[in-house]
Amino acid sequence: MLVIHRTDDGIPVEGARYLATHIPGAEFLELPGNDHAFFVDPDEILDPTVEFLRRVWADGGWDEDPDRVLATVLFTDIVGSTAHAAEFGDRVWRGVVEDHHALVRAQLARHRGREIDTAGDGFFAAFDGPARAIRCATAISEGVRSLGLEVRAGLHTGECELVDGKVGGIAVAIGARVAAQASPGEVLVSSTVKDLVAGSGLEFVDRGAAELKGVPGEWRLYAVMPA
C-alpha cells in the first residue's frame, strides 16, 4: 500500500504517518500543499503511484487479486478557477462553486453516476455505462455555462480495482490523464470509450494520438461533438 498525504491538508498528516508505520509493507509519501483530492495536481500524485504499482507488479504483485469491476470514470474541473476567485472575491466565488457542485451532482443523479471524490472545483465519478457517462459530461459542460464557467472533462473505461466501495487502479489514472488533455469546454474520451459506444448516436472528432504521462504507449483521444 502507498499512503500519500499533503503536509498542510485539513486532515492531520500524523494520521497518515501512523497508518503507514502500522500497515505491513506500506510506503509513505508526504507532499507539500493543502489539496486533498489527487486529481487537483494529477502529475504530482499519479507519477509516484504508477511507479509504486510497477514495482509491486515487478515483485510479483499482491498475494490475493483485488475485486475488479468494469467502469467508466469521469473527471471534471473548472477552467481558470484561480482567476475566477480573484475576480469575484472569496464570498461570491464560494457561492458559484456551490452552484457548480449542485449542478454536477444533479447530473450525476440523472445519469446514474456515482460521485467518488471531490475537492475544490474537481469531481471524480464512476458509471456502469460509457454512453451515460458521456451524456452526463456534456450536460455538465453545457450547464455550467449558465454560471459563466467552463469545465474540462475526460473519460476512460477499464477494469478498476474495487476497494471499500471506491474504484482505483491504472484505469483511473488514465481517466485523469485524459481529462488533463482536454481543452476548455471540451469533453475528451479515450479510444476505448469511443469504441464501446458505437451505435449510440454519439459523434466524435479525432484529436490524434497523445502520450499520457506514466502510461505506456500512445492513446488515441476523441472530443465529443455537441448534440
Image (tube, helix red, strand yellow):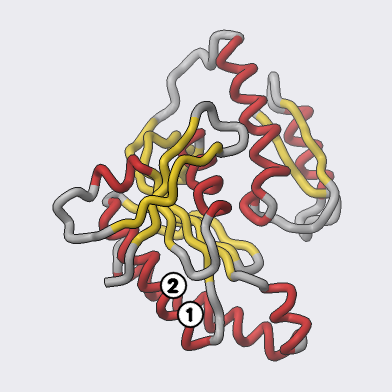
Quadrant in the rendering for residue 97:
bottom right
| Whole-percent x, y for residue 98 in the image | 58, 81
Query: In the visual, does 225 lie left or right of 103?
Result: left
Viewer-closest of 200 and 5? 200
Q: Are marks 1 and 2 in contact (CB under 8 Å)?
A: yes
Query: In the visual, does 135 lie left or right of 59?
Result: left
Viewer-closest of 66 and 84? 84
* Mark 1 closeness class: few <14, some 14–19, many ≥20 residues within 10 Å: many
Identify the residue under disc 1.
144
Q: Amino acid at mark 1?
A: Val
Which quadrant of the figure contains the N terminus?
top right
Identify the residue under disc 2.
141
| Whole-percent x, y for residue 183 in the image | 53, 62
Viewer-closest of 17 and 93? 93
Residue at mark 1 to residue at mark 2: CA–CA distance: 6 Å
For label 1, the SS is helix
Q: Does residue 164 appear anywhere in the picture?
A: no
Which quadrant of the figure contains the C terminus?
bottom left
| Whole-percent x, y for residue 111 in the image | 30, 66
Q: Which residue sits at x=77%, y=32%?
A: 28
Q: Amino acid at mark 2?
A: Ser
